Amino acid sequence: MISVNGQHFAAYTHRIPYRDVRILEVKGDVSNVEMKRTLVLKYPERLPQSEANNIELHIDDGINEIDASVEETVKIPHEWCIISAPNTQSDSSPKRNNSSNDLGLTLPYYGALPPNSLVDGRCLKIEGRVRLLPHSFYINLQQGQDIWPHPVIAFHLNPRFSKASSGAIGKAVVCRNAWLNGAWAQEERSEFDTNFRPGRSFCLAIVCTKTSFEVYVNRQFMTDFKYKVSPEVVDTVYIQGDVKLWNVTLEKNQMIKGKNMRVYQNPWFFSE
């Protein structure tokens, strides 16, 4: 496995045993080459420029309800805009993790969460834009930033646009899975007409309930995934693929005033 400046770059299956290697040759337009051989217990070795971003927190316990109807929370337009985060946040919240000129976050993106962040009533909000000719992208909610040893992944969400059998690019095969006990669990996949469109912005919310992750795109329910691992083990968000990423925040899934339901809640299970 090969890393550059603390980020995984490529993997190459070896053709001869490592013990047979005797010479390292470096050619090309480089200078001041140094070589060091060490024993590593994890990969890649993180450098200051490759450390995870602190995910912004908007989970002030003083904010419990919002005064809005269900229809208002669903019909808020999201196309071609960056959704503003709430002004109120706890004093312990880390600095905003996107650039001041909204050039976006660098991919692959690693975001760090405090321990026990993903509990019932919490919502991970991811804002960005789909690239013009998308193939796929994926989001991992995982334990740790290492690539090797393989981290525990509580939730792997992977929309695959090129696998659609027909229709517009917004029609995607959405795969969900988890990695635990050294292997992938049983993959779940469905074909959806999603709100992901080439060149269009999106607001994706991954909501923690008592039993599952629920996924919403532009406030419309898309899919869910029953817990295979406790979501409380998640301390890292990893995002990679054909998207432009603007912001990642952790928020409360607030209750709607006068209703026994939250802003993000699967409408199939609404109870009046």
Image (cartoon, rainbow, N blue to C red):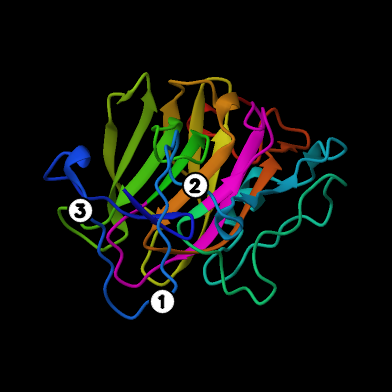
Give the CA separation, mark 1 to mark 2: 22 Å
Mark 1 element type:
loop
Residue 95 at x, y = what percent? Answer: 76, 57
The residue that label 3 is drawn on is 164
Q: Residues within 10 Å of mark 2 (few under 14, many from 20)?
A: some
The amino acid type, in three-letter code, at marker 1 is Ser
Going from N to C along the chain, the mark reached first, 2 or 3, is 2
The residue labelled by disc 2 is 45
Is residue 203 at least partly visible in the picture? yes
Residue 219 seen by the camera: no
Residue at the disc numbered 1: 31
Disc 2 residue type (three-letter):
Glu
Query: What x and y, as percent, mark residue 190?
Result: 27, 39
Q: Nearer the viewer, mark 1 or mark 3?
A: 1
The reply, left or right, for residue 102 in relation to residue 62 is: left
Q: Is residue 18 left or right of residue 134?
A: left
Q: Which residue is found at the position 53% from the left and 49% from the top?
A: 46
Callout 2 secondary element? loop
131 falls in the magenta region: yes
Q: Nearer the viewer, mark 2 or mark 3?
A: 2
Per the model, the C-alpha gap separating discs 1 and 3 is 47 Å
Going by the picture, which residue comes out furthest to the left? 15
- Is the C terminus in the top left, top right, bottom left or bottom right quadrant? top right
- Direction from residue 160 to residue 146 in the image, left or right: right
The amino acid type found where label 3 is placed reads Ala
Magenta region includes residue 100: no
Confirm or deny contact between disc 1 and disc 3 (CB under 8 A).
no
Which SS class for mark 3?
Answer: loop
Q: Nearer the viewer, residue 139 or 66?
A: 139
| Span colored in magenta | 110-137
